[in-house]
Amino acid sequence: MAAERIPLRQIKGVSAQKEQELHAFGIHSAMDLLEYYPFRYEDYRIRNLTEVKHGERITIQGTVTGVPVLQRYGRTKSRLTCKVTVDQWLVTCVWFNRQFLKDQLTTGRELIVTGKWDQGRMHLTVTDSEFADKESGRTGTLQPVYSVGGSITQKWIRKTIAQALVQYGAMIEEVLPGVLLDRHSLMPRREAIMRIHHPEDSEEGRAARKRLVYEELFLFQLKLHAFRSVNRERQDGVAHVIDNGTVLELAQSLPFELTDAQKKVINEIVHDMRQPYSMNRLLQGDVGSGKTVVAAIALYAAVKSGYQGALMVPTEILAEQHTRSLQRLFEPFGLQVDALTGGMKERKRRDVLAGLQMGVIDILIGTHALIQDGVDFRELGLVVIDEQHRFGVNQRSILRRKGMQPDVLTMTATPIPRTLAITAFGDMDISTIRERPKGRKPIKTYWVKHEMMDRILGFIRREVAAGRQAYVICPLIEESEKLDVQNAIDLHIQMQQAFPDLRVDLLHGRMTAAEKEQTMTAYSAGETHVLVSTTVIEVGVDVPNASLMIIMDAERFGLSQLHQLRGRVGRSDHQSYCVLVADPKSETGQERMKVMTETDDGFEVARRDLDLRGPGDFFGTKQSGLPEFRLADMVSDYGVLETARDDASELVSRADFWEAPQFARLRERLQQDQILESERLD
Ligand code: ADP
Ligand code: MG
């Protein structure tokens, strides 16, 4: 029987109750227990007193020399002291609440003690002690420290894992092929698992960890690559027929020339669309880098090749905006573009659904309403998901299932640091736009205190006088939408009083869809000078004439949100500005403001954000899709991750990967994870 299937109860010392408790740690079999790795070691190696420092935690060995003295205080507390000779020194050992030791500390007995060293007084405050004449588990070693809790104590789990190693260690089998072990001089698996629990020295612990981290990351990457490869080979996606003329035709109708970066990603997308597998591509590009037009060209190509396209966006405001701009763009080409949103009239909705089913509608744009039941496409060939970080993985797959196997293009303006990209989105192909359209000037960003409101008002007036428009954002925190809306209403009144001669509008989430649309239309048309808004405009909104973004209480926003908001300006060649009105109390709050003033490059912002928050928080845990690793740390083990990815990719593309006996164990793993159907394996 493989160790994966050996029940915990077979390990000596594991009772039914302990077994239950181990389950809570995700430990279900003997193998799980062997793979429950320590996160650090405690050093019980015996030290020489000449080389220890004051305040260090040390282990020393000596002979009981004096008579132990016990002092009691309180009802249960006690202090036991005893002189011990260590080499030529006389050390005073102090135990708290260990009165039972008193009788065992007989003169001449050899003792090993661990504790905190007081150099000046030659005192050791003992945390662990044992007699050298008794059988000892710890002495002279690095002891593993596991994460424990409940009735599972450190001592118990150490003993139990050591026991499991004795009983089942020999059954640990290698999973990595020899070529990879050789290439990276990795320890065999059995040895690595033995040693990570009980290393001779820190060097050995590190080597064992290195091997196991590599294994973990490699198997993870292998899954992603195998999945992609299998998906490609299945060839059950749509092979769009697209000629280059089609793409050029639309590109030439644009009022601007595409940037090289846009051309590059369009090529990547079109190449995928032509293939018989279903595309699964992530397009990342900073705010304002021009992703919409890339999506438009892909949608156009899909329609020209005889299919329908869908564009899913996170907000109704964005759905309206995209619908307007795509209708304008596709009008001369006779394409039918329609929207489906939550707030739509029933009759209109029925018309749209019918048009969709009959294939009269070529492109449908909408919020999550797009994926409700009853929305049926005639022949869906491409799905574009804008501002992906707003959608759950689940919604994506539902939409995907609506068509046969449509191509999927996911777009995000939250640049994903490479570390995360190859883990969270490792199953996707990634296209990146790193350049902004020509003529764009960096957005000047300032951080000011509330006292400077008068100057901010002066700033708004100046920009408006120059023909530009401004946004003033106030925070919206989910839990108290009502209060925040009131906030926005108050701010709106304040702004109206400050600018009696200008048109100042208000936008917030409690307005009806029609009201929102009206407000946005007026702002887009340049009729409104100042728009006071909550974060409903956070993503995607595109009004190129707006040049001033003022964010009130900016300390209440995260970095990526601030960057998104700032991205509402700087969308034309006018110099744009962002003013953060904030008085952050915390250090990271101040750091966020600093980052914003120092850079307007979204990739850099994301990198700094990752530094400040750590990868787990980066996307918010729920949607992150980030895998949990036992050992690997995505930041510090990044180099290994890259190596593992390259190895996995190389292996999967080898002709003999699917057959050669040396890879049988890996194929078995893929089968267990249902990435391979069983018939693939002979
Ligand atoms: P985002 O990537 O944030 O979605 P958009 O697609 O909304 O950016 O584009 C931002 C603005 O830049 C839009 O007004 C768009 O028309 C314009 N734009 C896109 N590509 C170019 C280009 N190559 N040259 C000039 N302007 C462009
Ligand atoms: Mg956009």
Image (tube, rainbow, N blue to C red):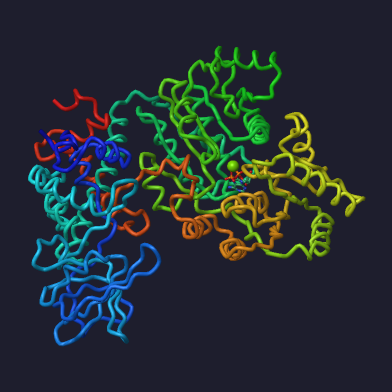
* Quadrant (top left/top right/bottom left/bottom right) for the N terminus: top left
Between 61 and 399, the one nearer to me in the picture = 61
**Which percent across, then down, holds residue 351?**
65, 14
Q: Residue 370: x percent and y percent?
A: 56, 24
- State which quadrant residue 585 falls in: bottom right
In the picture, measured across the screen, residue 347 lies left or right of residue 229, that is right
Report whether residue 107 is seen: yes
Quarter holding the C terminus is top left
Which residue is situated farthest in the right direction here? 501
Quarter residue 581 falls in = bottom right
Q: Residue at x 41, y 52 (%)?
A: 418
Residue 183, relative to residue 359: is it above or below? below
Residue 460 located left or right of residue 249:
right
* Residue pictured at 28% horizontal, 80% vertical: 123
**Of the pair 617 and 34, the residue shown nearer to us:** 34
The quadrant holding residue 110 is bottom left
The quadrant where ligand 1 appears is top right
The location of residue 103, given as percent across then percent down, is: 18, 68
- 160 vs 270, left or right, is left
Q: Position of residue 624 (x, y in %)?
A: 45, 43
